[in-house]
Amino acid sequence: MTTALFTHPACLLHAPPPGHPERPERLRAIAAALDAPAFAGLDRRLAPAASADDLALAHPAGYIAGLRAAEPAAGSFALDPDTHLSPGSFAAALRAAGAAIAAVDAVIAGAVANAFCAVRPPGHHALAARAMGFCLAGNVALGARHALDRHGLARVAIVDFDVHHGNGTQALLWDEPRVRFVSSHQMPLWPGSGSPDEAGAHGQILNLPLAPGTGGAAFRKAYATRVLPWLDAFAPELVLVSAGFDGHRADPLGGLALEAEDFAWLTHGLADLAGAHAGGRLVSALEGGYDLDALARSVAAHVAVLMERGA
């Protein structure tokens, strides 16, 4: 089988104000990296737009209607100091959420071995009825709900290695015993949540705060000794990944000291987990990563492992 790449030109339409770190150039840098000959074997698919029923898996209809209504005809509209709407933002959000859902469909159907969703806006900070942290809809949480409620899976693992805590995903799945959610993140750092005592209503959440300056050796040890064994005991039927690459040492918004090779190492571990329990089924969706060169290198390393393991 192959690795699928889900993306859509509409994801470039979301245009925060000049100088904003979550900019369309992020996807252009990723696209250029994945145009290299090494990635010719990717199964490239256009992300469908999520439906109202899809979004309702995690978000009330009134919130979605409000997002649509708030989209400006020109310029930008600030939902909060960090999170903005521009013409095309709503369409981009629909494609970002739709990519995660379609990728889950593809891996569960056995059409592809695994998938990477190169989409924006990101999703792991979005709450049920509040956009925040550049995020409008909970892309990965929606993918998990889709797998559980529509495909009948009993156990889904989510791993979020973005430098910022996945507070939105945590909140959307706080009372969901069928999901084990792991977030490793720098602390202290915005949004200020993600302490180890935030364990979910069923003890199904594992927060792994990392001190500023944490490098690859400590990052790998934490995953090898704490995260991967905890998830292995859960035996997930699907592995979802919130793939934020802003833990790279060059990223302007974080203070960790990771390299592209560290993301590749973790991708191998997550692929092992999926191979042991889920028939290899793994879906990864882009979250953060704001230095364009570091982002491109890190995504390339991540996707190369997915292709190797999916072949």
Image (cartoon, rainbow, N blue to C red):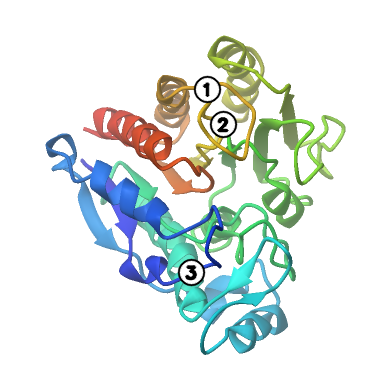
The secondary structure type at the circle numbered 2 is: loop
Residue located beneath label 2 in the image: 247
Mark 1 neighbour class, 10 Å CA radius: few under 14, some 14 to 19, many 20 or more: many
Residue 3 position in % (x across, y down): 27, 43
Between tags 3 and 2, which lies in front? Answer: 3
Task: Please report the residue visible at 77 percent of the width from the left and 46 percent of the height from the top.
Answer: 191
Q: Amino acid at mark 3?
A: Ala
Whole-number angstrom distance, CA of label 3 to CA of label 2: 23 Å
Residue 294 position in % (x across, y down): 41, 34
Residue at the right extreme, as displayed: 197
Q: Which mark is residue 192?
A: none
Task: Please report the residue visible at 59 percent of the width from the left and 38 percent of the height from the top.
Answer: 162
Task: Please report the residue visible at 57 percent of the width from the left and 14 percent of the height from the top.
Answer: 224
Callouts 2 and 1 close, C-beta under 8 Å: yes
Specify whether residue 109 is in view. no
The secondary structure type at the circle numbered 3 is: loop
Specify whether residue 22 is in view. yes
Residue located beneath label 3 in the image: 15
Figure check: 77 above or below 261: below
The disc, 3 or 2, on the residue closer to the chain's N-terminal end is 3
Figure check: 212 above or below 252: above
